[in-house]
Image: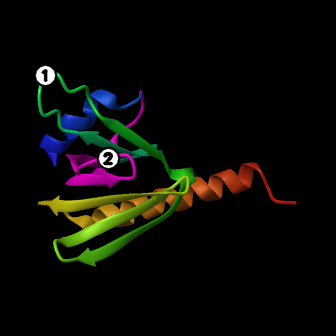
Amino acid sequence: MNLVKNQVEHVLHEGESVIECLSCSLVAHYCLAPQAGFFAATNKRLLFCGIQVSETNKEFVEEFEYRNIASLSEKRGITGKHIHLYYNQDLYKFQQIQGMNMFDFMVAVKEKMCLFSTSTKEHYPVR
């Protein structure tokens, strides 16, 4: 996990720390091919940092605020386990998950989703 943390550390905000992380590939509506990288749950948001393939490729970073995540689920497919994330009405698939504990990652993210959705409701009560 330290290797993965080192890969995403440069995009963290002040006071932000990595809780759990995975090595995987992202498949999204705007990607022509799966993007290999690191999926990290921090104390403030989810981050996906793509691995740069060459010097000409610019860094690929996708961030997901916990309060805007509609759902997060584990799916099983032909190629193994996947994570499906619905964020702002778009589907993001994380596949080819390797070498990390996906269960701990999912638990950590769902705890943060509950925490952020609860704190938002407490600040802005429904009338």
Measuring 45% from the left and 64% from the top, which residue is drawn there? 110
2 vs 1, front mark: 2
Image x and y of residue 16, in percent: 40, 36
Residue, disc 1: 55
Image x and y of residue 84, in percent: 38, 65
Gap between marks 2 and 1 measured at Cα:
19 Å
| Vertical placement of residue 83 versus 21, above or below | below
Q: Which span of residues is magenta-colored? A: 14-40
Residue 98 is at least partly visible in this image:
yes
Which residue type carries mark 2? Cys
- Between discs 2 and 1, the one toward the N terminus: 2
Image x and y of residue 112, in percent: 47, 56
Q: Secondary structure at mark 1?
A: loop
Is residue 74 highlighted in magenta? no
Query: Dot 1: within a 10 Å radius of its alpha carbon, few (fewer than 14), some, or many (20 or more) residues?
Result: few
Measuring 63% from the left and 59% from the top, which residue is drawn there? 118
* Drawn side of residue 24 relative to residue 88, left or right: left
Q: Mostly what secondary structure, the magenta segment?
A: strand
Residue at the far right in the pictured view = 127
Measuring 29% from the left and 59% from the top, which residue is drawn there? 94
Residue, disc 2: 31
* Drawn side of residue 1 relative to residue 84, left or right: left
